[in-house]
Image (tube, helix red, strand yellow):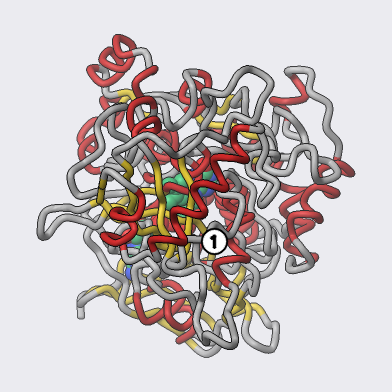
Amino acid sequence: MQTADEYDLVVLGSGAAGLAAALAGREHGLSTLILEKSAKLGGGTTNSYGLLWFGRNHLAADAGYSDSREETLEYMRFLAGGEAITANFDAFVDRSPDALRFFESCGVPFRIVRGVRDHYFGVAPGAKEEGRSLEVDLVSGYDLGQWRDRVRMSSVQPCYITAEEQIKWGGVNRAAQWDSELVRTRQDADMRGKGVGLVCQLLKCLLARGVQIETSCVADQLLREGDRVTGIIAGDRRILARQGVLLATGGYESNDALVRAYEGLPDWMSQVPTSVTGDGLILGMEAGGAVHTLRNNMQLFLGFGIPVEEGQEPEFHLAGIVELCSPHTMVVNAAGARFADEAYFQGIIPSLRHFDVLQHAYPNLPCFLIFDQQYASRYSFAGQPAGQVPQWVARADDLPSLAAKLGIEPDGLSTTASRFNAHVRTGADPDFRRGELTWRLAHDGDMPAGLNQSLGTIEQPPFYGIELRPSGASSAGLLTNADAQVLSSRGQPIKGLYATGNTAARTEMGAGYQAGYTLASNLTFGYLAARHMAGQQAR
Ligand SMILES: Cc1cc2nc3c(=O)[nH]c(=O)nc-3n(C[C@H](O)[C@H](O)[C@H](O)COP(=O)(O)OP(=O)(O)OC[C@H]3O[C@@H](n4cnc5c(N)ncnc54)[C@H](O)[C@@H]3O)c2cc1C
């Protein structure tokens, strides 16, 4: 074993959680090392839309939006569904605005994403139409010098346009309407936004401060002295951490055994890189950390795998907030029956988890996305230009033939489509009230103005279909306190051990999900952990 390197803070993982904690640590005077298992930085964060949700943030206040602690609290309480832990919930409510200012002062430029409302606007108390969803400004990869090619670029998330532009230009299902000239200019300048942009903005700040970063380095074990974590072992290296080791290795979505243990749904597919295998969870458990599971985690989506060449990373396309929100689509189970409002991904989740006692099976899994040529001609499928449905998607000239190809009950599918089409012609969906909730990132249906834009008949051949699979953010993580310290099952902090991001249980949020919560939480608890390590308690 080599002689030990020594730092104040050793961060494992380089998604938004790890990079934010490292930047906060460095800014609080801690000598900091980031170790990333993969050859590239960024983790699952690079797949994300990069929305950051901050209640009563200063950017909104400066722009004239009204918000208050009470309204933020009301909304977050609604979302938490009784599953949040009060101290962590309070820390998120009260300290996230400080964290936002802090990272801004470090040099990360944020701005309001206009056109994005809170998920439960019009339903939950305290929800706002605009002002709480933020994103970072675009940053050029060339600003990163030799690190430019060492950031993971997502194959599923176009990052050269901002989330605001994407929404303004017709939504996530309308790639054909994007400003192609601007897109080309941005690509030439290697401009990066969304989750990749957040990673690059944080990285730029870290590089400017000379923070040490190593890739392709896996921490195998935590070093302990008595009841304190004192560093890590990676291969034949010992690296000491005087103030703390911070676990930010993401969740465990690419670890089948942990998914089986904590998710409990069949046919799960990971939406994050293959390196996200629950390492932090395992290291934390080995050090005596308690695991906490959200029983009703609403951060669950439907999507499908995109075929890739052998040896390439699997690609998961999140259809739940793209195709499913768009007209001329529906989701059916193997009996050919619809079972939820397709346009609102949270609405689908309880139906996916439903277990039929007499069938002794999940009646709504497997399930299938069905669409017709009207959708194919006008909207993007799997991020392709309108009109291009890849050959690996099943198709047929009539619905019973499509059903037979997919393993759906043919009569069931035909009956469901007839009923759905009849309802669409009246402009409503009395069965599941599809599209009545207004949050969505896909817009611009083709119904007359004023009518429900997520509705459209499914009647023009050819008909297309693909099996959907559940995916999401991990329901379980290490139990932490408001300073992001990992807690034992007796509720005692394990000295020198911290966890943030998806490695930590989402006890600050509880069951509900609001786009932007996780990235905002990553920044907030990275900031609080760094302050704690530097000797300033969260409260
Ligand atoms: C399509 C999509 C859209 C999303 N959109 C949003 C959004 O708009 N807003 C939002 O808030 N959230 C969004 N999310 C969720 C959000 O992206 C994640 O919750 C967040 O990025 C998790 O960050 P993290 O740093 O915890 O993990 P990750 O970003 O996954 O990073 C973990 C890193 O740890 C590394 N690692 C693993 N094991 C080790 C080890 N032993 N040693 C060292 N390194 C290790 C991994 O390689 C990885 O790089 C989205 C997710 C998806 C898939």
Name the element at disc 1: loop
Q: Is 242 in front, or is 316?
A: 316
Relative to residue 115, is residue 516 depicted above or below? below
Q: Does ligand 1 reach within 8 Å of label 1's beta carbon? A: yes
The location of residue 11, given as percent across then percent down, is 42, 60
Classify the position of the C terminus by image quarter. Answer: bottom right
- Asked if residue 248 can be seen in this view, the reply is no
Which residue is drawn at the image coordinates 57% and 72% (left, top)? 353
Q: Quadrant of ligand 1?
A: bottom left
Judging depth in this view, the residue of 84 and 117 nearest the camera is 117
Tell me the residue at 56%/28% (across/down): 110
Q: Name the residue under label 1.
A: 500
x and y, in percent, of residue 340 in the image: 60, 56
Count neighbours of disc 1 (C-alpha within 10 A) and say few if under 14, some if 14 to 19, many if 20 or more: many
Q: From this viewpoint, is residue 498 visible?
A: yes
- Residue 261, compared with residue 33, is above or below; it is below
Q: Quadrant of residue 233?
A: bottom left
Report the amino acid beneath label 1.
Answer: Thr
To which quarter of the image does residue 183 belong?
Answer: top left
Which image quadrant: the N terminus?
bottom left
Q: Which residue is drawn at 41% across and 51% down?
A: 369
> Number of numbered discs present?
1
Residue 253 in the figure: left or right of residue 163:
left
Residue, far top: 181
**Vertical placement of 499 versus 123: above or below?**
below
Q: Where is residue 88 in the image (x, y as percent from the top left)?
A: 73, 62
Residue closest to the eye, 74 or 391? 391
- The residue most toward the left is 310
Q: Quadrant location of residue 53?
A: top right
Q: Which of 224 and 44 is in front in this view?
A: 44
Q: Is residue 513 left or right of residue 398?
A: right
